[in-house]
Amino acid sequence: MSEFILEMRNITKEFPGVRALEKVTFQVRKGEIHALVGENGAGKSTLMKVLSGFYPHGSYSGEVVLDGEVQRFRDLRDSERAGIAIIFQELALVKYMTIAENIFLGDEQCKRRGVIDWNRTYQKTSAVLQAVGLRLNPATRVIDLGVGSQQLVEIAKALSKEARLLILDEPTAALTETETENLLKILGELKAKGVTCIYISHRLNEVARMADRVTVLRDGRTIVTDEVVRMPQERMIQNMVGRELTNMYPRRARPVGEVVLEVKGWTIEDPVKEKVVVEDISFEVRRGEILGIAGLMGAGRTELVMSLFGVWGKKRGGEMRLMGKPLRIESAYDAIRAGVSLVSEDRKRYGLVLGMDVKQNSTLASLERIARFGVINKNEEIKLSSKYVTELRTKTPSLEQRVGNLSGGNQQKVVIAKWLLTRPRVLFLDEPTRGIDVGAKVEIYNIMNDLVDQGVCVVMISSELPEVLGMSDRILVIHEGRLTGSLPHAEASEQKVMYYATGGA
Amino acid sequence: METTVKDARSEVNLKELVLSSVKHNTKQYTMFLALIAIWVIFATLTEGVFITPRNLSNLFVQTVTTAILAIGMVLVIVAGHIDLSVGSVLGFTGAVCAMCMIKADLGVLNSVLITMVVGLVIGAWHGFWVAYRKVPAFIVTLASMLAFRGLIIGLTGGQTQGLEMAPEYVANHFKLIGQGYLPTLAQAGEGQLHDTSLYAVVALIAVFVLASLRKRAARMKYGFPVLPMRFESLRLVLLSLIIALFGAIMVVYLGIPWAVIFVLCLAVLFSFIASNTTFGRHLYAIGGNPDAARLSGINVARKTFALFLTMGVMTAIGGIVYTARLNAATTSAGQNAELDAIASAVIGGTSLMGGEGTIPGAVVGALVMASLDNGMSLMNLDITFQYVIKGLILLLAVWVDMAQRKK
């Protein structure tokens, strides 16, 4: 038997008009954590879909060899039976079911035909939950869990199926630092138990810490596979983008101007849980600066900006001034009219209408600008949306492309275009680079810089510390709904931000 | 390097363009083809009676109420809602209109206006519950479906109210809405062509061709892909032939019915609303992704309210035309009409998931539904089978649509 648990040989996968994978070779050793990296659209997800049988045998050319045997998976069930478990980027849990129901969904533990044995189900669930370090009641509904715990439930589900090869697609994209730490620890433990893991991630420092070996894909080809210790991050990035990135964070220092937005004593209650989630937060944003907002997941950052934008929460107190004038914002409509815009954190849920095309999405928040008596001036629509496609360098075959068919980075650019078309004075960006590739990230940073040069105030929430530190002129740190620290660029460091983010104690 | 990439791309684009356009158009034409297939089948089974100009002309008039409801229903479904009440409300508003003329002697114009206001109020009632009280439209309109069926009985006293009970000049004028034809100028004997109707058809084709060419020119100006001229002209000729065919059927019989002209105007108006107004765009956005719509500054509740107002008025219009065609208000008026309207919209490509659908598609869908009714009645088919067949056709149509989408 060979040293490889998995070998994918000469995999070629074509879609109409595109060759997504071209003779990709991918070999994974038994018991290792193997990182798969590459820009969005490089073919990572496609390769994993070939492996898991999502694309059935026959729809690609090449061979998938597991334990020395050529496999012909027709669907996900086939690959599951062979011991492969894939955890997709978008979690596949049923939100209103309990943990136990989710874990054994499709594989229900039965007494007799069709009658569920709840005792055994809960017992087994407790066992796998323990293996992933979750101390939770198996009867908890998934909707009541944080993203981090949900991720672990997914892993527990995979373990319950006795998976030998675990595939994780961007598992930490939505996790906080602590949750990430926890996940990485669990993966280490699983490795010790002999589970092989394929780890797809944009976070190269995690890759460097966790993985034994790494394979870089670019434009549907294998560029290199090597031991992680022999691949410093710069070389990894270089292989991913095919060029050297001289500066990941192109921050430009600018003279700081007058106060544009002023928030005082902002206090917001969660309307469902009836609990204060943003408490007495005051800050100001000045012309010419990028203000970063850091904090752990669930600290109330998203709630803060969503409430400032007028679309979330019950206001308990506080005021907001724009250029010295008091603002009353009760809906997105009010915010847009006042010149406040928000690129929300979940672009598919809050940002885009996936069935609409690029131009319709671009103009959705500013239709009034291009309409007279409620009739849309379609020529103007084309002009404006194509202007931003050019300016933001959005890669799309045409303005009439459905945004659902664009890559993550380009979707994000369409969302940004939508908000720029409203001509904002203050632009809130909530996790603007989540789930998009390195190259596109730098482009988003450059867009932020250009906006600030044009006099727009940019406020960026980010869970990626290097990003907040690299791009912000000033960083606000939030912990459990309260402002715990405010750091100018020169004084900020990862340690300091983490210190305040964990409560400053 | 740059140029080779670009060349390769434009070549792929041309091939893709023609392919996608063929695919796009087959979808458009499959509906027509299905319609033609249904016609051929009925023509054979009824030994030609079905395709006589007389029958087809009647068929078009029978389509009208379903088409009016379907046009409104497209917008409702696109926005992610449903309206189950249109059948009962159609019957109720029709009865209101009839009673205005019979009992209150209000004249045609006043009666029609009052009826439309009643439709508006009913729409406001639905809109209030759906938009501002967040009760699912399915439930709100299900309640109305029951309630208005009852109110019809209350209003008409449970009896058919024939319009011959109204003053004669009122009844005669009102009848025109549902049964009248475009007048013929040159008076002559039997079998003559109906001149004004003929001119109307020619004008329609001319407007259609010119509008298409203008749109093509505009697209070229903005660098959008357009079909090569030979494909475009083929498309135009085909579509013009279809219009001519439909027009000819009516021109040869008694001329174009006013009701048909009316529906065409509504279809054009609502197509414009759907694709060229902020209101239409907002409805598609709300149906496609309500959260994104709300965060884009769209007042979802207000638009939803306006949507149900629109549907209410459209239903009242349907009620007026229906009553005029039947020449009476009956207690069973509009029964199952909501299902015909929904079926027409869905057969015409409207997605029940929201965010997708076209007005012309729904009109063709209505024609399909009316053809089934008409053809099966001509065949004297047992009513049992009529229902079963209509149900199965709907199932089949949606399955075909889903299968095509998947590809």
Image (cartoon, helix red, strand yellow):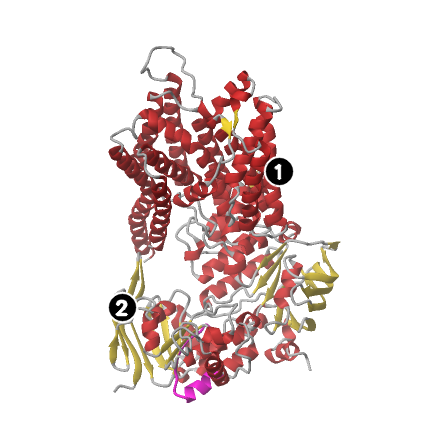
Give the quadrant of the N terminus of chain A. bottom left
Q: Taking the image as drawn, is residue A148 in sight?
A: yes
Q: Is residue A479 magenta?
A: no
Residue located at (55% from left, 19% from top): B170
Task: Specify the subunit that label 1 lies on.
Answer: B
Q: For the residue labelled by badge 2, is the local secondary structure a helix, a strand or a loop?
A: loop
Residue at the outermost bottom position: A192
In terms of image quadrants, where is residue B245?
top left
Marks 1, 2 in one chain: no
Question: How many residues crowd around disc 1 within 10 Å: few (fewer than 14), some, or many (20 or more)?
Answer: some
Residue B85 position, x and y percent, is: 53, 43
In terms of image quadrants, where is residue A370?
top right
Question: How many residues crowd around disc 2 within 10 Å: few (fewer than 14), some, or many (20 or more)?
Answer: some
Residue type at tag 2: His
Q: Nearer the viewer, mark 1 or mark 2?
A: 1
Q: Taking the image as drawn, is residue A377 in sight?
A: no
Q: In the image, which disc is placed on residue B121?
A: 1
Residue A285 position, x and y percent, is: 68, 62
Q: In the image, which disc is placed on residue A57?
A: 2
Numbered range of the magenta stretch:
A186-202
Q: Is residue A190 magenta?
A: yes
Residue A147 position, x and y percent, is: 53, 72
Residue type at tag 1: Val
Q: Is residue B133 above or below residue B255?
A: below
* Front one among A443 and A354: A354
* Front one among B400 and B359: B400
Q: In the image, which disc is placed on residue A54?
A: none
